[in-house]
Image (cartoon, rainbow, N blue to C red):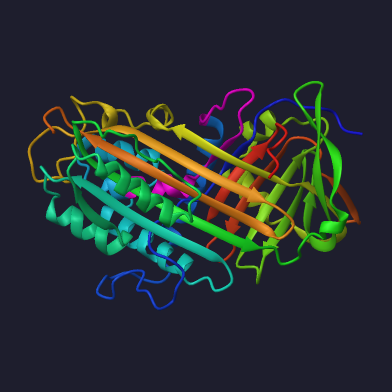
Amino acid sequence: MFKNMGGGLIIMALILTGCGSDDSDEVIPSHVDYNEDDFNQIVEPNNKLAFNLLTQVEPDDKQNLFISPTSLFMALSMVYNGADGETKAEIAEALKATGIEVENLNKANASLISKLHNHSAIDLDIANSIWVNDEFSLNKDFQQNTQDHFNAEVEEINITDSDSPKRINQWVEEATNNKITDIVDSPLDENLVAVLINAIYFNGDWKYEFDRALTETRPFHFNQDGRKNIPFMTLEKELKFMQNEQVQAIELPYNDEEMSMHIFLPKENYSLEELKEDLTYDKWEEWQSEFDETEGVLRLPKFKLDYEVILNKVLVDLGMNTAFDEEHANFSKMVQDEDLLWIDKVKQKSYIKVNEEGTEAAAATSVEMKTVSANLDAFQMVVDRPFFLTITDNETGVILFIGAISNPPEIE
C-alpha cells in the first residue's frame, strides 16, 4: 500500500527550566518583574530553532534521534547572561533572538516558565541548576539573573571530589523521574569551571486513549526494502486532521487539551528527508491553520527511545563560533575571575515513550564551561512508514517536541 522510505528517527523534545507543577511552589520569585505575556517574544525564535535543529542534527543511518529545542534555547539563554561582545551576538543569532535585549530575554523565559508551570492536567516538572567549581565565583549579576528568571539552583562543587559528579547526576535523575542518568562523566575535568543544566519530566495522558484490545502487530516499513513487525495502536475518533499533496497530519490532545502531539505522515511520493528539508517555521504556521475536526481512524506505532547527542558542531554551524573558541570566547559576565572561559561541551540526553495511555518524556541539557587555569472527508491514516511528529503547548504555541521516525522504534 505504501512506498518504503529511508531515514532515521528524529524527534525533538522539550527541556525547560524552572520547578515542578505543584502550585504551592513559587516557580518565579515574586519580586521578579515580568509580564504574563512576555513569553510571546520567544515563541517564534524557539520554534525557528526547532526547525534549524531538525536539519542540522545528523543521526547515524540506523540511529533514532530525540532532541529538545526549548531545552537548548533556555540553556543558552542562561549562558547568554554571561556572554559579551561577539560571543554574545553569535549566541543571539543562533537563538534567532537578535534584537531582544538580555533583560527582555530573561523576562520572556520567566514568563514561559511560569506559563508552563500552571498546567493542571499535565505532569510537567521543570528544573534548572548551575554547578560551580568552588575555586571560582559567579558574577553577582549573572547569578542573580539566572536565579530570578530561570529559578536556577546554584551549587558549589569540589571538582576533584569523586562525589561531585554523583551529586550532579543524582540531581538530574531526580528532576527527570530517573529517566535521564549520567549527564556528566566521572571524574570531572580539572579545567571545569561550571556546568549549567536544564531538565524536564513530562507525563501526559491522551484525552482519547487507545483501546489496548485493538493493538495489533503490523509491519513498519523503513529504508528501501526493510520492514519489521511491531505493535500498532488504533483510535477511531473525530480529531483535528489535515492533508495536502505532501502529508497527512493529525493532532492528538492530552487530557484537557493544554498540550497536543502532532503527527505528520509524508505521502508516498514525498520522503521524510524532503519533509525535514522543507519544513520551515512559516510552513509550520501555515499547516497549523489547516487542521479541521474530521472523523477517521488512526493507527500509530507504540514506541520508546533514549538518545544522546553532543551539540557543539550544530551550534557552530548555527553561528556560535567564538563561544567554543578558547582564545576568542567572551564570557566575562559569568564569573568574577579574569580567566578565559569558553564552552567545552553542550550535551543533551533524552527519553520518550508513547503507548495507549499517553506520553512520557524526559530530557536534560548540560553546558560545560572550561578555562585553561581551572582547577476533511473521513480519513484513513495508517502510520506504517516514516513519519514526523511534534508535541506543542497549545496556549503558548511553543513546540515542546519535534521529530521524525523512520527506523522501527524500540518497543517496551
Q: Is residue 16 visible?
A: no
Q: How many marks?
A: 0
Asked if residue 321 lies left or right of residue 200, the reply is left
In which quadrant of the rendered image does the N terminus lie? top right
**Does residue 181 appear to the left or right of 335 in the view shown?**
right
Vertical placement of 89 versus 260: above or below? above
Residue 62 belongs to magenta span? yes
Q: Nearer the viewer, residue 100 or 138?
A: 138
Residue 129 or residue 16, whichever sits in front: 129
Residue at 47% across / 33% down in the picture?
309
Report the side of 281 relative to 197 (left or right).
right
Kindly identify the residue that appears in the image at 84 percent across and 51 percent down: 215
The residue lying toward the viewer, choosing from 184 and 33, is 184
Residue 157 pos. (x, y %): 19, 47
Identify the residue at image location x=25%, y=44%. 164
Q: What span is colored magenta in the figure? A: 56-77
Q: Dividing the picture into quarters, in which one does residue 149 lie?
A: bottom left
